[in-house]
Image: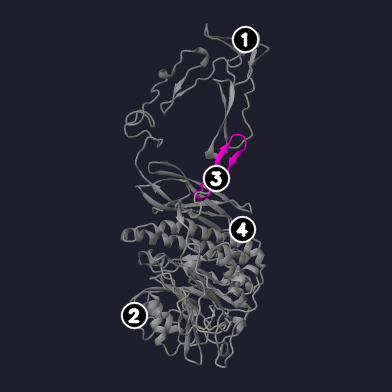
Amino acid sequence: MLLLALLISAGQAFAEEPRSDECTAGVADGDVTVDGRPLLWKLRNQSDVTNDVHYFVSGVEHYSGLGPATYSYLGMGPANDYPEGPIRQGLNSQGLAVGWNVLGYSGWEELHHQALGHYNTISQVRSYVNEMTSLSTYNYFIDTGGEATPWENQIGIDQHWEYNTHAPARDSQWIDVDNADSDDDYSTGVDVTLSGWVVRANAPGHFNTDGTDDLGNTGRYEAGRDIIGALIYNNGSGTALSAKSIATSFFRHDALAIYETVSNMMVHGVLPTEDPRLSTMWTLLGHSETGIFVPVWIHGVESDGVNEVPQYLDSGDDGVCVYAPAKGMYNAGFNVADVQARTLPFEEHLFDVVNDKLLPDWRNRDWTDSAAVAVIGEEMKRVQERMDADAYWHLKYLHDNGATSNYAPTVSIHPSTHNGLEVTFSVMADDADGSELTYLFNYGDGQIGSSATHEYDQAGRYLVSCTVTDENGVSQTDWLFVTVSGEPTCDDGIQNQGEDLIDCGGPCPACACLVDGDCDDGAFCNGAEMCNAYGECQAGSAPCSGLYCDEGNDVCLECYDDSDCDDGLFCSGAETCVDGTCQAGTAVDCDDGIGCTDDSCNETTDSCDNVPNDGACDDSLFCSGTETCDAGLGCQVGSDPCPEQSCDEINDVCAATAPEPQIFLPAILKNYYISGSLDKAY
């Protein structure tokens, strides 16, 4: 999917918004992200007014003169600007996203509604920008083909520059990183490549009409550039640019998140082969230092034709919005470290659920099947509304009761057993405050309940969630997909399909027994053997507990010496006779101290067996290789399954290592990310 990033920025000499209110934003194409999908991000600083998210339906004119929108879209900005007002950033149903810097300039309101409501490609936006005569601001866009391009506009000289991360030469690009004009000054010239990413803090990099430039005039730009550069180049050891890493490193940096921070957005795009409705808009309303990013999918908003943004992302008529606690805690001077000790692990869980569980599953669905697409929309709606509510009540409790007042509970859900249509889930939950927890399952079939066991009406694949809530009303939710086959099997634990007993006989393997008499070994001293419900013989109970068993006469007698009590079994130890009563021996201890061996007593050889079990060492990770158990050394690490190749943990396959991104940075910039020294911004 193309990430189209449009940044149109105005020169400092003409800036109407104070530098203290600078926004900071950026774009990256798939060459420098962890999964090859593009990213757009925007940290917005301005006056303290509630920001929220609104939905704009297709078929309606949302900006005078543009006509009815072709596509629906989400828009973020000050709550009182809606429904007909301008939007600061947003995402449409075609995967086109926009971010915008600098208030006080013209043209951007029209551009945003035109682009989000009518366009789905970068070429369409480029043509429109080239025809505009009243545009004087910064804007960022992303769409569905893998490309990322910001534009900047210079007020007073009727000119704009396009910064394409794929680096084709453009006539108006002036940062000369390849020294095309041979003057050894990378701040002059007409050719540029930004190596797959661009960061901007309003207008840090272009010429002014008086011949001066804005390079290096703001620590905010330099901080943003350095953060993203460090994530990408990682001191030369690889790429680590993702929405999750940007959320932590970029949006929580105190040089970027300042007092005026009011809203934050990241759009995680898609691959060219994927459906644009998989584009994820990560949203944090309020201050990024004391807020929580939650996901929004426009396909989820439109599910069932309801067209509703998650409740706490829209201030609505009641004015209730996550903006209030997320911004209020920062304004009130809450200790940021105390707040983040409670919010960042919570947020990390949301990123992990979406990126590791939900998106991989949705990407593999059949997006040409309207019924399957409708199910995905319902699932997206459930997820974003639940995560939005969990985040809001967590933040509100901290805001109302203090930064150290409460930790959210933690929860992890896994399938445990399947018995036909019946599934039992295993849940692990904890609360750092020691609060008593309540559990609520959404089984994914329209039913909810507190039981970990649920019987489905029909086979299918279901998205199951478990919400754990503490005594303060603060909750955390975990999710998983479960496939219910519904077909009876010979190991479903139910006597069905003509079986003689549970899972045996009839179409299944023959039962070892059907009645108790089938198990009788004829030995009095062994007790009465029984046949259980699974057709398995169970040993009887010794009839002479504490006495000597006389097998020849089928009677129990007092013992005279230890030999009378000897059961002839090595593994049970040496029995003794005490005052006419047999005392059990101490069972042989076969523990060899090696955690991965299966330790047992071998009655046949009168010795201990300590058998290495490789499965006990398995970490369930394909990319770490096959672990083994050594009888003397314990678990041994596996060998790399993909030597000289990249390893795909999600799909358990080796893939040819992608070529290193084409990095066209000049030597001074490449050295910077190794040595940490750079004298001039670019």
Q: Residues within 10 Å of mark 2 (few under 14, many from 20)?
A: some
Q: What's under tag 1, amino acid-wise?
A: Glu
Please provide percent x and percent y for residue 552.
52, 6
Choose the circle earlier in sequence order: 1 or 2.
2
Q: Residues within 10 Å of mark 4 (few under 14, many from 20)?
A: many
Choose the circle earlier in sequence order: 1 or 3.
1
**Residue 487, placed above or below residue 15:** above
Which numbered circle lies on residue 638?
Answer: 3
**Residue 553, placed above or below residue 354:** above
Task: Please name which of the two marks, 2 or 4, marks the residue nearer to the observer.
Answer: 2
Q: CA distance from mark 1 to mark 3?
A: 58 Å
The answer to which of 259 and 664 lies nearer the viewer is 664
Q: Residue under circle 1?
A: 558
Q: What's under tag 4, amino acid-wise?
A: Tyr
Q: Residue under circle 4?
A: 407
Helix, strand or loop under label 3: loop
Q: What's under tag 3, amino acid-wise?
A: Gly
Choose the circle earlier in sequence order: 2 or 4.
2
Q: CA distance from mark 4 to mark 3?
A: 38 Å
Helix, strand or loop under label 1: loop
Magenta region, residue range: 619-639
At 66% from the left and 62% from the top, the residue drawn is 404
Quarter of the rendering occupied by the C terminus: bottom right
Q: Residue under circle 2?
A: 68
Please provide percent x and percent y for residue 379.
41, 59
Q: CA distance from mark 2 to mark 3?
A: 60 Å
